[in-house]
Amino acid sequence: MIGTGGLTFLFLDEADTLNALVARVVPGSDGDPGAQEMGVVTYIDRALSGAYREYQHAYRTAIRALNAFVRQEFGATFFELDAADQDAIIGRLEKGDASGIDAADGRDFFMMVWAHTVEGMLSDPTYGGNRDAAGWRLIGFPGAHYGYTAEDMRYGKDLTTKPMVTLTEIQTLAREQPELFFHRTGPTSPAAPAATPPAETTGEAPVLQGASPTDSNGRSQ
């Protein structure tokens, strides 16, 4: 179950339920981490306190409805069931066949959790999920490097030999060696054209090109 500290939005029973749910979306183990082992619930919890604040109500009401349905069917909460029963419940959610939960709401909730689970597995570890960059290692992505060459970006390029870099490490490097980020070498800028010195003042009005000079009475000469 989820630890007692670190949650920013979810209550403990909600976090335990969600943790069990994401563990069935992408199962794993200590040697082969899945969503639970990668800390996906931490990612979702933090997101619900920030960028995904608009989903707070959807998560809270759906988790409570899910546990009410499970208690009615099994006399326990979702996270207390074994994996087989949890999978059966998820299947009913996908089909819209969970009593007490609107069919569309059940399917929408599962799809929302599925999408956020994938995000949590593949986002930068700075945001709480993808613990130890396990999700990135799974797909061969070396992380938040300062830049990638055209060769690196070539389809099929093997990047597993590049060192793993996270945003936290980039931020640390920016603090310790800011010159790497603010002083870039590049082509020399062309020199600015020399300023034209002002014409010597003679006290006479300048004559426009094509115009005839005039006498003191304003007549053309």
Image: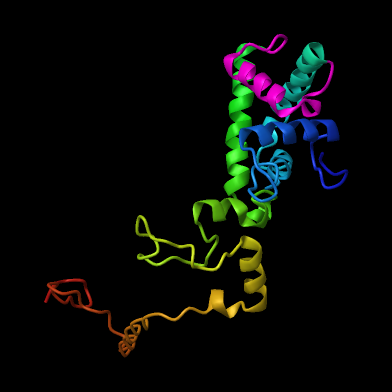
Q: Quadrant of the C terminus?
A: bottom left
State which region is magenta. 75-101
Residue 78 belongs to magenta span: yes
Q: Quadrant of residue 190?
A: bottom left
**Splitting the image into 4 quarters, where does residue 168 fall?**
bottom right
Q: Residue furthest right?
A: 4
Vertical arrangement, residue 73 with respect to residue 64, above or below = above
> Which residue is most to the top?
99
In this view, 142 is above or below 96: below
Residue 63 part of the magenta segment? no
Residue shown at the point (61%, 53%) measured from the top left? 134
Q: Position of residue 9 (x, y in %)?
A: 79, 38
86 or 111, nearer to the observer:
86
Residue 81 percent coordinates (x, y): 78, 25
Residue 212, how many percent across, how many down?
A: 13, 74
The quadrant holding residue 93 is top right
Q: Nearer the viewer, residue 199 or 156?
A: 156
